[in-house]
Amino acid sequence: MQYIVLPFFAYLVGSISFAYWLGRLVKGVDVRKQGSSHATTTNTIRTAGWATGLPVLLLDIAKGYLPVYLAVQLGFPTWATVLTAAAVVLGHCYPLWSGFKGGMGLATTAGCILVVEPLAMPIGLALLIALTLGLRHGARASVITGVLLAPVYSLFGFRGLLLWMTGVLGLIIAGRFLIDWRREYRELWLDREVEEETSGNG
Protein backbone atom coordinates (compact mmCIF):
# COMPACT_ATOMS: atom_id res chain seq x y z
CA MET A 1 0.00 0.00 0.00
CA GLN A 2 2.82 2.42 0.81
CA TYR A 3 4.11 2.01 -2.74
CA ILE A 4 0.85 3.58 -3.91
CA VAL A 5 0.32 6.12 -1.11
CA LEU A 6 3.71 7.83 -1.36
CA PRO A 7 3.59 8.37 -5.15
CA PHE A 8 0.09 9.80 -4.73
CA PHE A 9 1.39 12.07 -1.98
CA ALA A 10 4.32 13.00 -4.24
CA TYR A 11 1.95 14.06 -7.02
CA LEU A 12 0.02 16.28 -4.60
CA VAL A 13 3.25 17.85 -3.34
CA GLY A 14 4.41 18.38 -6.91
CA SER A 15 1.08 20.04 -7.67
CA ILE A 16 1.89 22.93 -5.33
CA SER A 17 2.79 25.52 -7.96
CA PHE A 18 5.04 27.90 -6.09
CA ALA A 19 5.56 30.03 -9.19
CA TYR A 20 1.82 30.57 -9.50
CA TRP A 21 1.09 31.15 -5.82
CA LEU A 22 4.09 33.37 -5.03
CA GLY A 23 3.55 35.32 -8.24
CA ARG A 24 -0.01 36.03 -7.18
CA LEU A 25 0.91 36.74 -3.57
CA VAL A 26 3.92 38.97 -4.11
CA LYS A 27 3.17 40.72 -7.40
CA GLY A 28 -0.46 39.94 -8.12
CA VAL A 29 0.47 38.31 -11.44
CA ASP A 30 -0.45 34.96 -12.94
CA VAL A 31 2.79 33.67 -14.45
CA ARG A 32 0.78 31.26 -16.60
CA LYS A 33 -0.65 34.20 -18.53
CA GLN A 34 2.54 36.19 -19.08
CA GLY A 35 5.97 35.63 -20.59
CA SER A 36 6.44 32.00 -21.58
CA SER A 37 3.11 31.07 -19.91
CA HIS A 38 4.91 28.41 -17.85
CA ALA A 39 4.99 28.29 -14.05
CA THR A 40 8.78 28.17 -13.89
CA THR A 41 11.56 29.95 -12.06
CA THR A 42 12.67 31.82 -15.18
CA ASN A 43 9.17 33.01 -16.00
CA THR A 44 8.66 34.06 -12.39
CA ILE A 45 11.86 36.11 -12.52
CA ARG A 46 10.69 37.65 -15.77
CA THR A 47 7.21 38.56 -14.53
CA ALA A 48 7.67 39.01 -10.77
CA GLY A 49 11.39 39.67 -10.27
CA TRP A 50 14.38 37.88 -8.78
CA ALA A 51 13.18 38.24 -5.19
CA THR A 52 10.21 36.07 -6.07
CA GLY A 53 11.93 33.78 -8.58
CA LEU A 54 14.75 32.58 -6.33
CA PRO A 55 12.41 31.28 -3.58
CA VAL A 56 10.42 29.54 -6.32
CA LEU A 57 13.61 27.79 -7.47
CA LEU A 58 14.49 26.61 -3.97
CA LEU A 59 10.95 25.46 -3.20
CA ASP A 60 10.64 23.59 -6.50
CA ILE A 61 13.91 21.78 -5.74
CA ALA A 62 12.71 21.02 -2.20
CA LYS A 63 9.41 19.55 -3.34
CA GLY A 64 11.30 17.15 -5.60
CA TYR A 65 13.67 16.27 -2.80
CA LEU A 66 11.11 15.48 -0.08
CA PRO A 67 9.12 12.57 -1.58
CA VAL A 68 12.21 10.84 -2.99
CA TYR A 69 13.99 11.26 0.35
CA LEU A 70 11.05 9.57 2.07
CA ALA A 71 11.09 6.74 -0.48
CA VAL A 72 14.79 6.14 0.10
CA GLN A 73 14.46 6.31 3.88
CA LEU A 74 11.56 3.85 3.80
CA GLY A 75 13.66 1.42 1.80
CA PHE A 76 11.51 1.48 -1.32
CA PRO A 77 12.66 -0.76 -4.18
CA THR A 78 14.03 0.95 -7.25
CA TRP A 79 10.78 0.81 -9.23
CA ALA A 80 8.75 2.39 -6.41
CA THR A 81 11.30 5.16 -5.86
CA VAL A 82 11.33 5.91 -9.58
CA LEU A 83 7.51 5.96 -9.55
CA THR A 84 7.58 8.42 -6.64
CA ALA A 85 10.05 10.68 -8.46
CA ALA A 86 7.99 10.54 -11.66
CA ALA A 87 4.83 11.41 -9.71
CA VAL A 88 6.30 14.54 -8.12
CA VAL A 89 7.71 15.79 -11.44
CA LEU A 90 4.41 15.11 -13.23
CA GLY A 91 2.63 16.97 -10.43
CA HIS A 92 4.92 19.93 -11.01
CA CYS A 93 4.30 19.89 -14.76
CA TYR A 94 0.58 19.20 -14.54
CA PRO A 95 -0.53 20.48 -11.11
CA LEU A 96 -3.93 19.47 -9.79
CA TRP A 97 -4.27 22.70 -7.84
CA SER A 98 -3.53 25.04 -10.76
CA GLY A 99 -5.59 23.77 -13.64
CA PHE A 100 -2.87 21.32 -14.80
CA LYS A 101 -0.81 24.26 -16.12
CA GLY A 102 2.54 24.07 -14.39
CA GLY A 103 6.27 24.15 -14.87
CA MET A 104 8.71 22.21 -16.99
CA GLY A 105 10.23 19.86 -14.41
CA LEU A 106 13.90 20.85 -14.33
CA ALA A 107 14.17 22.18 -10.77
CA THR A 108 11.99 19.42 -9.33
CA THR A 109 14.08 16.79 -11.12
CA ALA A 110 17.19 18.40 -9.63
CA GLY A 111 15.69 17.88 -6.18
CA CYS A 112 15.12 14.19 -6.94
CA ILE A 113 18.70 13.80 -8.15
CA LEU A 114 20.10 15.49 -5.04
CA VAL A 115 18.65 12.74 -2.85
CA VAL A 116 20.17 9.88 -4.83
CA GLU A 117 23.53 11.32 -5.89
CA PRO A 118 24.31 14.98 -5.06
CA LEU A 119 27.44 14.98 -7.25
CA ALA A 120 25.34 14.14 -10.28
CA MET A 121 23.37 17.39 -10.22
CA PRO A 122 26.22 19.71 -11.33
CA ILE A 123 26.98 17.30 -14.17
CA GLY A 124 23.41 17.52 -15.40
CA LEU A 125 23.44 21.29 -15.02
CA ALA A 126 26.70 21.55 -16.98
CA LEU A 127 25.18 19.44 -19.76
CA LEU A 128 22.13 21.70 -19.95
CA ILE A 129 24.23 24.89 -19.98
CA ALA A 130 26.60 23.54 -22.64
CA LEU A 131 23.73 22.53 -24.91
CA THR A 132 21.93 25.84 -24.37
CA LEU A 133 25.03 27.83 -25.29
CA GLY A 134 25.73 25.60 -28.25
CA LEU A 135 22.21 25.44 -29.67
CA ARG A 136 21.21 28.94 -28.55
CA HIS A 137 17.75 27.59 -27.81
CA GLY A 138 16.68 26.74 -24.26
CA ALA A 139 13.81 24.37 -25.06
CA ARG A 140 15.72 22.31 -27.61
CA ALA A 141 18.67 22.10 -25.23
CA SER A 142 16.32 20.87 -22.50
CA VAL A 143 14.78 18.22 -24.75
CA ILE A 144 18.21 16.86 -25.65
CA THR A 145 19.38 17.08 -22.03
CA GLY A 146 16.40 15.00 -20.97
CA VAL A 147 17.23 12.31 -23.52
CA LEU A 148 20.96 12.29 -22.76
CA LEU A 149 20.86 12.61 -18.98
CA ALA A 150 20.92 8.92 -18.06
CA PRO A 151 23.46 7.94 -20.77
CA VAL A 152 25.79 10.76 -19.68
CA TYR A 153 25.53 9.68 -16.05
CA SER A 154 26.36 6.14 -17.16
CA LEU A 155 29.51 7.42 -18.86
CA PHE A 156 30.51 9.06 -15.57
CA GLY A 157 30.23 5.69 -13.83
CA PHE A 158 26.90 6.12 -12.05
CA ARG A 159 24.73 3.03 -11.78
CA GLY A 160 21.50 1.74 -10.30
CA LEU A 161 18.69 3.97 -9.07
CA LEU A 162 20.12 7.20 -10.52
CA LEU A 163 20.11 5.82 -14.07
CA TRP A 164 16.61 4.39 -13.85
CA MET A 165 15.26 7.57 -12.29
CA THR A 166 16.90 10.01 -14.68
CA GLY A 167 15.97 7.80 -17.61
CA VAL A 168 12.29 8.22 -16.73
CA LEU A 169 12.46 11.84 -15.56
CA GLY A 170 14.55 12.77 -18.58
CA LEU A 171 11.81 11.54 -20.90
CA ILE A 172 9.20 13.53 -18.96
CA ILE A 173 11.32 16.68 -19.29
CA ALA A 174 11.97 16.06 -22.99
CA GLY A 175 8.28 15.55 -23.67
CA ARG A 176 7.34 18.64 -21.71
CA PHE A 177 9.81 20.91 -23.52
CA LEU A 178 8.78 19.70 -26.97
CA ILE A 179 5.86 22.15 -26.82
CA ASP A 180 8.42 24.98 -27.04
CA TRP A 181 10.59 23.41 -29.74
CA ARG A 182 9.71 26.09 -32.30
CA ARG A 183 9.69 29.02 -29.90
CA GLU A 184 12.02 31.90 -30.73
CA TYR A 185 14.33 33.17 -28.01
CA ARG A 186 15.84 36.53 -27.24
CA GLU A 187 17.74 35.81 -24.03
CA LEU A 188 19.24 32.40 -23.39
CA TRP A 189 19.16 32.58 -19.61
CA LEU A 190 15.52 33.63 -19.39
CA ASP A 191 14.01 31.77 -22.37
CA ARG A 192 12.34 34.97 -23.50
CA GLU A 193 10.40 35.13 -26.73
CA VAL A 194 11.54 37.42 -29.48
CA GLU A 195 9.36 40.47 -29.54
CA GLU A 196 7.90 41.30 -32.91
CA GLU A 197 9.41 44.38 -34.42
CA THR A 198 7.03 47.21 -35.01
CA SER A 199 6.61 48.41 -38.54
CA GLY A 200 8.24 51.71 -37.62
CA ASN A 201 11.58 50.12 -36.67
CA GLY A 202 14.19 50.21 -39.38
Image: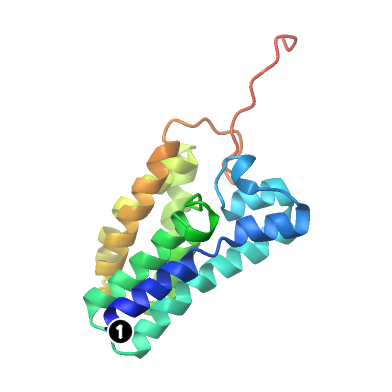
Q: Is residue 80 left or right of residue 48?
A: left
Task: Mark 1: give few (<14), some (14-19) or many (20+) Cα within 10 Å.
Answer: few
Which residue is found at the position 45% from the left and 55% from the top? 93
The image quadrant where one finds the N terminus is bottom left
Residue 20: tell me if it is visible: yes
Examine the image and state in which quarter residue 24 appears: bottom right
Q: Is residue 136 above or below residue 124?
A: above
The residue closer to the viewer here, 106 or 20, is 20
* Residue 112 drawn at (x, y percent): 41, 71
- Secondary-structure class at tag 1: helix
* Residue 171 drawn at (x, y percent): 30, 53
Examine the image and state in which quarter residue 58 appears: bottom right
The residue that disc 1 covers is 2
How many dots with numbers?
1
The image quadrant where one finds the C terminus is top right
* Residue 187 drawn at (x, y percent): 61, 38
Which residue is found at the position 64% from the left and 47% from the top? 31
* Residue 176 drawn at (x, y percent): 39, 47
Examine the image and state in which quarter residue 6 appears: bottom left
Which residue is found at the position 42% from the left and 77% from the top? 67
Q: Is residue 189 left or right of residue 11?
A: right
The residue closer to the viewer here, 155 or 121, is 121
| Colour scheme of the picture | rainbow
Disc 1 marks which amino acid? Gln
Q: Is residue 109 above or below residue 146?
A: below
